[in-house]
Amino acid sequence: MKAEKNSIQLRKGVIEMCVLHLTLDDPKYTGDLLRELKDASLLVVEGTLYPLLNRLKDDELLEYYWEESASGPPRKYYRCTGEGEQYLEKLKSNWMELVASVNGILKQNIVKQ
């Protein structure tokens, strides 16, 4: 149970980076973001995404616009801002350093066993 909680916390930490990356080149509808994050096994609870989107918007890392939908009400599309792109590059750099460090330790422990 404790490992599952840690896994959820770890996922929450990387969802921000993934949302910025997913909205970098193509604006995304909230439903598309939910689907892509769920397909990647990153999103466990939908309620995690909405506060994150609002915070990223408030921090001017994401912006949104409304677009009419042929099958219902207008849809809100999110896209990464220029400031969001710069922030994303820092997050990716930090992530790569972290992964390299952890992999180094894990490989070291495998060799010792």
Image: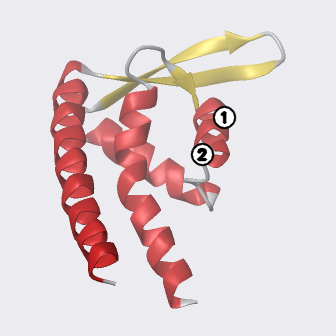
Q: Amino acid at mark 2?
A: Ala
Residue 81 placed where, x, y %? Answer: 27, 22
Q: Residue furthest bottom?
A: 1
Q: Is residue 101 left or right of residue 52?
A: left
Residue in the picture at 17% in, 40% down? 93
Q: Residue furthest right?
A: 71
Residue in the picture at 43% in, 49% down? 15
Residue in the picture at 29% in, 67% down? 107
Q: Amino acid at mark 1?
A: Gly
Residue 94 placed where, x, y %? Answer: 17, 48
For mark 2, give the secondary structure.
loop
Residue 35 drawn above or below residue 103:
above
Q: Viewer-nearest of labels 2 and 1?
A: 2
Number of dots carrying numbers: 2
Mark identifier at residue 80: none
Q: Quadrant of the C terminus?
A: bottom left
Q: Is residue 55 left or right of residue 89?
A: right
Residue 32 placed where, x, y %? Answer: 64, 30
* Residue at numbered disc 2: 40
Q: Is residue 79 left or right of residue 59?
A: right
Q: Is residue 99 left or right of residue 31?
A: left
| Label 2 with label 1: CB-CB less than 8 Å | no
Residue in the picture at 34% in, 42% down? 17
Determine crowd level at label 1: few under 14, some 14-19, many 20+ residues with C-alpha closer than 10 A: few
The image quadrant of residue 61 is top left
Mark with earlier residue (2, 1):
1
Residue 102 drawn above or below residue 49:
below
The image quadrant of residue 84 is top left
Residue 9 drawn above or below residue 36:
below
* Residue at numbered disc 1: 31
Observer-nearest of 96 and 62: 96
For mark 1, give the secondary structure.
helix
